[in-house]
Amino acid sequence: MCRGLDSLPITCLERAKELKALFGSLLQKSDHSIPGQAKKNDKVRLNVNEPLKWKESFEKLLSSQNGLCLFRAFLVSEFSEENIAFYLACEDYRSTKSSKLVAKAKKIYDEFIGSDAPREVNLDHLTKAITKENMEQPSVSCFNLAQAKIYTLMDKDCYPRFLKSSTYLELTRKTKTG
């Protein structure tokens, strides 16, 4: 599934293609919904108007499992998937048991923020320095500033490009004409 910290981008791309096909098929169904498979034995109902809601706000896009998956696939195509992966890792981190905070914080820092991070996110020097200082005694809020910066980057830069992408425009065009 697209949402997990350790999910592979190809899984999300496959899911995005599946969603695109399902939304296209949806318009030909009389009840305007079609069951899809998100997880084994877990049915999702896709509403034909769902893509239109994503344009209302970045938050609405992220709160939709289908929207998030398509957005993540878009970021993969733009070579900036690390942004949503970091954001989701921070969301997951907030619900971590206190006994596991230190290990999980180190994993997130090493993967996304550290100087040799394999999926380094684009943060300014001050934010990196503050986050590094927070790592001395990790708490549930140690990534808040960095996460807020990446959220703003996606909201102001990636999200508008997603709304102009051919995949999104095709979905909304089909929705309007369906």
Image (cartoon, rainbow, N blue to C red):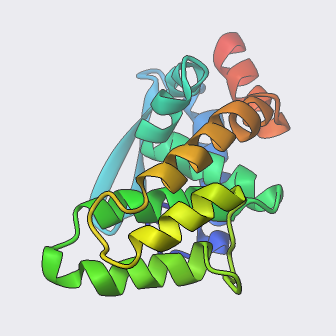
Kindly identify the residue that appears in the image at 59 percent across and 36 percent down.
23
In this image, 3 relative to 16: left or right?
left
Q: Could you say which is closer to the camera, residue 103 or residue 170?
A: 103
The quadrant of the rendering that contains the C terminus is top right
Residue 78 coordinates in the image, percent (x, y): 83, 55
Q: Could you say which is closer to the camera, residue 72 or residue 47?
A: 72
In this image, 37 relative to 110: left or right?
left
Residue 25 coordinates in the image, percent (x, y): 61, 36
Residue 18: quadrant of the picture: bottom right
Kindly identify the residue that appears in the image at 47 percent across and 31 percent down.
59
Residue 125 coordinates in the image, percent (x, y): 70, 61
* 148 w.r.t. 55: above or below: below
In this image, 72 relative to 3: left or right?
right
Which residue extends farthest top?
176
Kindly identify the residue that appears in the image at 30 percent across and 83 percent down.
102
Q: Is residue 72 visible?
A: yes
In this image, 168 relative to 51: left or right?
right
Q: Is residue 6 visible?
A: no
Kindly identify the residue that appears in the image at 69 percent across and 72 percent down.
120
Residue 123 coordinates in the image, percent (x, y): 68, 57
Residue 171: quadrant of the picture: top right
Q: Could you say which is closer to the camera, residue 37 or residue 67?
A: 67
* 177 w.r.t. 15: above or below: above
Number of callouts in the render? 0
